[in-house]
Amino acid sequence: MGMKTRGAALAVCMVGAMVLAGCAGGAGGPQQKAGNISNDEVVIGVLNDQSGVYKDLSGPNSVVAVNMAIADYKAKYGDKAVAKKIEVVTADHQNKPDIANTKAQEMYERQNADIILDVPASSAALAVATVAKAQKKLFIDVGAGTTALTGVSCNKYTFHWAYDTQMLAKGAASLVKNGGQNWSIVYPDYAFGQDMQKSFTAAVKDAGGTVQQSIPTPFPNDNFATFITKAASSNPDVIGTMAAGGDLINFVKQFNQSGMRDQVKLAVGLMFITDIHSLGVDQFAGTSFTDAWYWNFDKTNRAWADRFTKKTDTRPSFAHAANYSAATQYLEAIQRAGTDASDAVIKELEGKKLNDVFLRNGQVRADHNVVHDTYLAKVKSKDQVKEPWDYEEITNTIPAKEAYGPVSTECKL
Amino acid sequence: MSAFIQYTVQGLAAGGFYALAALGLAVIFGALGVVNFAHGACYMLGAVTAAVLLDVTGMNFWLALVVVPVLMFGFGVVIERFLVRWLLGLDILYNFLLTFGIALVLVDLVKRMYGVSGLPYQQPAGLEGQLHLGSATLPKYQVFVFIFALAVCVVVWLVLSRTRVGMIVRAATEDAERSRALGINVGRWVTPVFGFGIALAGLSGVLAAPFRAITADMGGNFIIILFAIVVIGGLGSILGAVVAGFIVGMVEAYGQAYLPAFSQVAIFLLMAVIILVRPAGLFGRADSV
């Protein structure tokens, strides 16, 4: 007993000593010459959904992607790196705008974050954009879809990286040219769904098609049986669903059971590869959707995805790759600017043409929307799948110039 | 007209499923006076268990329909023995809070173990395709769910109202003290009844697996509709739960067809009207309010 106690005390002392040594090492170690870096370190905040519906498509694995970007930056520049010390801080915003607001302030003010990344859920993203503007610190949104970020609610410090509702609509509307003339749209009746419904209606009309009916549904919703019957009642060529997450799975399962699958094309407004994975490729087979990036598109993507998979045991969603890209381009901008001061970094991003594993023909537009090539994808059938997560066939690459809506006239930076 | 028939048939099919899911809630409240807020989580657990068993052991839907409720029965027994029982004599709110907490724990455990995107589940063999009933078309699976759910509801009702066991359970729960005086071991009956209610929740979860998203959150929205059903039917009334299940299914289908944006609001409007006109619900006893 006495031996045990003494042993435990010794262990505590040793741990304490190690902690102290660690601290001392940190403080007394070689001082970095980084006069132009605030607090001598660049702090990147990743604020997203760590526990709810968007956890799998962004969540902790977005943090992994950002850390990969940091490692690559360090490896690339070594001693010449302007940002010598880079730290990542994370928080869970639970998809709630009020929590996102508080956490963003905490990150900028107390944790000295120089930038916040990711932030899925449109309402939360808009909240963070407001904080970024007030704090005069950068915010690159990846996970949210609202066009307001680069439209009516745009500001100098906010950039929108991966996708928006107009881009999703433009991609999917290319189905009109492939026999998808008449559409029925079923959308969840809240901000995102309404935004999607408007974007899709406009895009289908632009492409020469007709939207016969738009049907609002409650959100969240489990039972879509009658909505599906109603949507099919006008004999459309395409039924477009704007449901996301669990509701999307409910919709597709019930759509397939209803037998509509053989009669009508299904287009999904917003789909992540994690959705296909969770429902099983069979249930989605033949479904069309717009993708911002696909891990198995080419060798470059695949090589990056392999590195990602080694760390996470899962394949990356486009949001993961986009977070990597956003962090990379941010660090590159610091490198060019020689400082992490917000205004200088923004100057290094604005108007720039960017290319990396995620951005192909990328460009930062005047409204801070980062446009790039996007893809029309079709879900493979089960016998076409050659390996785990091999779910998508890219049927069309949409050039960056045509992939997005016009530069917003409502945006005054 | 043919569209109307189609909507009606869809409403009936959905109603059957709701009736079965609400049944367990009504049985537990009727027998123990416990408002089981964990019912949605147990429904979720049933679906997740079925999906995990399919993935790990390859167990098919038909076997899961038997195995999962048995497992959930055991789970219910454990919950009752170690947790619910201790609060039975206290205010009804205590067990309400306890089961609410249990629901939170279960949902987060499932999220932790299986993520949030959901689990895949195949269409059960033999139930693919559609059935044409006159001018209406229904997925075979929905027809099956309707018939199966209705059969379970009838059997439960018969057992509780027509058999000796049912009589003892009802007596024990309605007036525990007098039943004890007549030589009935009341405590012995409480545990299996609770387990049975949880098994019914698990059974609805298995039935949900082929046509609903199997996620940790699937019970969250569902439990709210279930509560609307038992309130409309009358808390603790088994017949009430079944009838109200069908009413809600119909209201939802007609709502989706004719007032899409208000299809869910309509259910709660109905609930509000019922509470105003008949506070005890359609089949509830006035003293249970």
Image (cartoon, grey):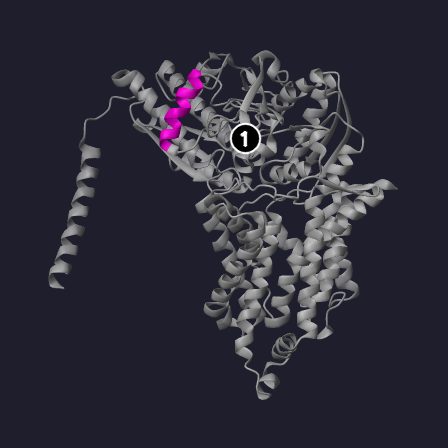
Q: Secondary structure at mark 1?
A: loop
Q: Quadrant of the N terminus of chain B?
A: top right
Q: Which residues are magenta?
A: A299-311
- In the image, residue A8 above or below residue A210: below
The answer to whether residue A280 is visible is yes
Near-viewer residue (A150 or B215): B215
Residue displayed at 45% across by 25% down: A321
Kind of residue at badge 1:
Phe
Question: Residue B195's quadrant in the figure?
Answer: bottom right
Residue to which mark 1 is pinned: A272
Check disc 1: other Cα within 10 Å, few if <14, some if 14-19, many if 20+. Answer: many
Question: For residue A192: magenta?
Answer: no
Residue displayed at 74% across by 59% down: B244
> Which SS does the magenta portion mostly show?
helix
Question: Residue B192's quadrant in the figure?
Answer: bottom right
Q: Position of residue A23 (x, y in %)?
A: 21, 38
Chain under disc 1: A
Q: Position of residue A62 (x, y in %)?
A: 43, 31
Compared across the picture, whether A231 is left or right of A356 comes to: right
Q: Quadrant of the C terminus of chain B?
A: bottom right
